[in-house]
Amino acid sequence: MRDSNRMTRRTFIRGASAAAFAAGCAGKPTPPLPTEPLPRRTLGRTGLEITRLACGSVGEHVLHAALDAGINYIDTAPCYPDWRGEATIGKVLKARKTPRDQIVIATKIKKEHFARIRPTPPKGYVESVEQSLKRLGTDYVDILVQHEAEFEHMNDEEVLDAFAKLKKAGKVRFLGAANHSHHGSYALDAALESNDYDMFMVVYNPFDAAQQLNEVLHRAKEKNVGILAMKAVMLLKGAEHRQQNPNFIKEMKRRAKEQRRGLNLYQTSIAWVLGHDPIASVCITYGNVQELREDMAASAVQLSALERIQFQRYARVLRGSVCDWCGACLAACPNGIAIPDIARFSLYYHVVGDRDRAREEYAQLQREQKAANCADCGRCEKACPQHLPVRGMLREAEASLA
């Protein structure tokens, strides 16, 4: 059941200060569905033509709206809650009688998540995918994604062997990987070196798009490996929740006067991401139909080079409000607390509203990695490039997630 306390990412936009930036966008009725087909891109060597907006894990009503709008890429995982997971996708596709070849379905595998899969945790990767196929009501998935993969996982023989067996059986078509950390460039680089991966999901947004990552993304394009961006607006959600940067409101008002395209903050961020040539699509978890339709309006917008530079400069000001999972605190912590992961779980809990997932993922951490193991030494805060109150965040996380 969906959490009734869920904060959507438009909540802050409806505030007075954000309304200045949105230039009147906030509070409008739900935009109509587009009359023109959504733009598409080829996802690298998969040859799959996918819409420039992909649908993350959403509820039944929003999924119907996404498919009505023409979105053809659905991202899921067996560990996601039922109300927005594989079973819901299977139910919707069955009800719509959608031809299978008109939809691209990607699901995930990660051994550490097996215990969260209900009702029967799988014993291996092949069994996990076969369970996914039953929930999805399909004979195959287009892309099998290695979930939360770091560079050391890219040559995992168990994953590669399972993929080979499943592909030979016609149950999967392509192999991908997803990296949720600030170190996506290392993981993607390792994936490119292995030459086993057809696509890659990477955190990409104007707040922390490092030059190193941009260089690896261009190498991916040269090697024809498809790129799907994610977390395009996640840091905005975090900023809404915390509002710690005193420059945020001031800068937002200033930009409101310069804005001429009529895009709100989130739409501009999505347009910025899609303006980077190696990116085929951006995967977003829409909180409601309003968000979905607003974002669709941004998918066809092409920002100029000057607009991209200006928005990224603004985004860097906002960046100081939230944790971007850079890992500096983790390196400084004498107790090895998984601070970047805990920060991400806190966003799932407080901002995305996915409290069950946040608590389940927190529970998977080793005891010594949890917030309760904090010695209050303050080394994390000295190492943090954003100068965030890390210890306070850990105390909040322990209260919410433990």
Image (cartoon, grey):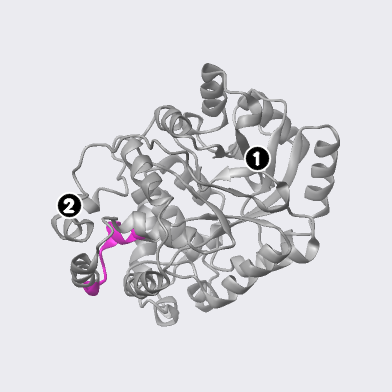
Front-most of residues 191 and 49: 49
Which residue is the site of mark 2?
A: 24
Q: Does the image show residue 2?
A: yes
Q: Position of residue 226 (x, y in %)?
A: 65, 55
The first of marks 2 and 1 along the sequence is 2
Please state which amino acid type lies under the numbered disc 2. Answer: Gly
109 relative position to 211: left or right = right
Task: Label 1: state its secondary structure.
Answer: helix
Element type at mark 2: loop
Q: Quadrant of the N terminus?
A: top left
Q: Is residue 240 left or right of residue 192?
A: left
Q: Would residue 124 be seen by someone viewing this image from the given angle? A: no
Label 1, on which residue?
A: 114
Residue drawn at (42%, 59%) of the image: 302
Q: Quadrant of residue 225?
A: bottom right
Q: Would you place residue 60 above or below residue 273 in this image?
A: above
Magenta-colored span: 236-247
